[in-house]
Image: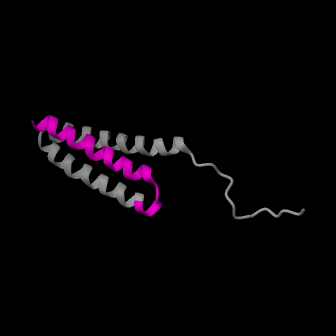
């Protein structure tokens, strides 16, 4: 029998390490701008850090919707949990 191959079929397997890199880069970015803001502005930097991490999480959620990848949504959840606990720890 003569089988034809689909030229549009993707033979590429999903990259699980790439998904973890996305989460790692998001957490690394949050750490860097958190250290910069708190380092420069002191206690007032925590308020700016709070707004910035919420904006970061919102952008991750929008990216999850556009790219249809759960790793972006999970990154936003991690950012909110870690950011909130960081702010609560330093303010309390």
24 vs 35, left or right, is right
Q: Nearer the viewer, residue 2 or 52?
A: 2
Range of residues picked out in magenta: 65-92
Q: Nearer the viewer, residue 2 or 59?
A: 2
In this picture, is 80 found above or below 42? below
The colour scheme used to paint the residues is one colour
The quadrant in which the C terminus is found is: top left
| Residue ID at (41%, 57%) | 64
In this picture, is 2 found above or below 49? below
Q: Position of residue 20 (x, y in %)?
A: 46, 41
Q: How many marks?
A: 0
Q: Nearer the viewer, residue 60 or 34?
A: 60
Q: For the view shown, which residue lies furthest in the left direction?
A: 92
Chief secondary structure of the magenta portion: helix
57 vs 86, left or right, is right
Q: Position of residue 57 (x, y in %)?
A: 30, 52
Q: For the view shown, which residue lies furthest in the right direction?
A: 1
| Residue ID at (90%, 62%) | 1
Res 10 → quadrant: bottom right
Q: For the view shown, which residue lies furthest in the front direction?
A: 1
| Residue ID at (30%, 52%) | 56
């Amino acid at each position: 029998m003569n089988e034809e191959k689909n030229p549009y079929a993707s033979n590429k397997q999903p990259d699980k390490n790439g998904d973890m890199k996305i989460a790692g880069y998001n957490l690394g970015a949050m750490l860097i701008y958190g250290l910069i803001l708190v380092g420069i502005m002191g206690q007032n930097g925590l308020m700016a850090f709070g707004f910035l991490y919420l904006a970061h999480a919102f952008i991750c959620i929008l990216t999850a919707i556009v790219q249809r990848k759960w790793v972006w949504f999970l990154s936003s959840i991690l950012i909110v949990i870690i950011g909130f606990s960081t702010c609560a720890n330093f303010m309390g």
